[in-house]
Image (spheres, rainbow, N blue to C red):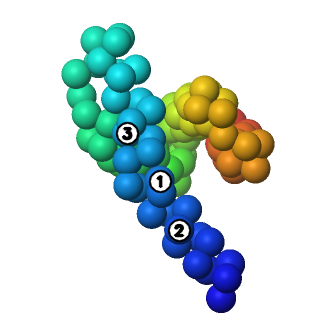
Amino acid sequence: VDGVKDIVKELEDKLSGHYNATWSPIFKSVGFEIGVHLFRYAIGAAEIIFGLLLLVSPLRPLASLILTAIMGGAIYTHYTVNDPVSEIIPSAVLGGLSFV
């Protein structure tokens, strides 16, 4: 039960604005006008779309390349906000699997 509470608490922290507070000033400083929430939805949609395109044989190399780039961005993002290695590992594993 405590493990479930920890997971719920972590999800609440991530969705409550911790990352928004970190990334909003960075987005503004580089002239990126899109909001952090919209950016996260766009990345999620891209992951789903290109994940499904992995099932389509002729588009598999393109989908694999784009998913690998997205996971590279996720690794960089986790590193930039000083997340622990335990949060970087899933992105690294998925990036490696999508590259193969």
Which residue position holds label 1? 14
Which residue position holds label 3? 20
Q: Is residue 64 above or below residue 7?
A: above
Q: Residue at x 45, y 63 (%)?
A: 12
Tell me the SS state at disc 3: helix
Residue 35 visible in the displayed image:
yes
Q: What's the residue type where badge 2 is placed?
A: Lys
Does label 1 or label 3 sit earlier along the sequence? 1
Label 1, label 3: how many angstroms apart (C-alpha)? 9 Å
Tell me the SS state at disc 2: helix
- 88 left or right, relative to 36: right
Residue 89: x and y in percent read 75, 46
- 55 left or right, relative to 49: right
Q: Which quadrant of the figure contains the N terminus?
A: bottom right
Residue 83: x and y in percent read 66, 40
Res 43 → quadrant: top left
Label 2, label 1: how many angstroms apart (C-alpha)? 9 Å
- 71 left or right, relative to 52: right
Q: Residue at x 40, y 20 (%)?
A: 26
Q: Is residue 46 above or below residue 9?
A: above
Where residue 100 is drawn, which disc sits there?
none
Where residue 9 is drawn, which disc sits there?
2
Does label 2 or label 1 sit earlier along the sequence? 2
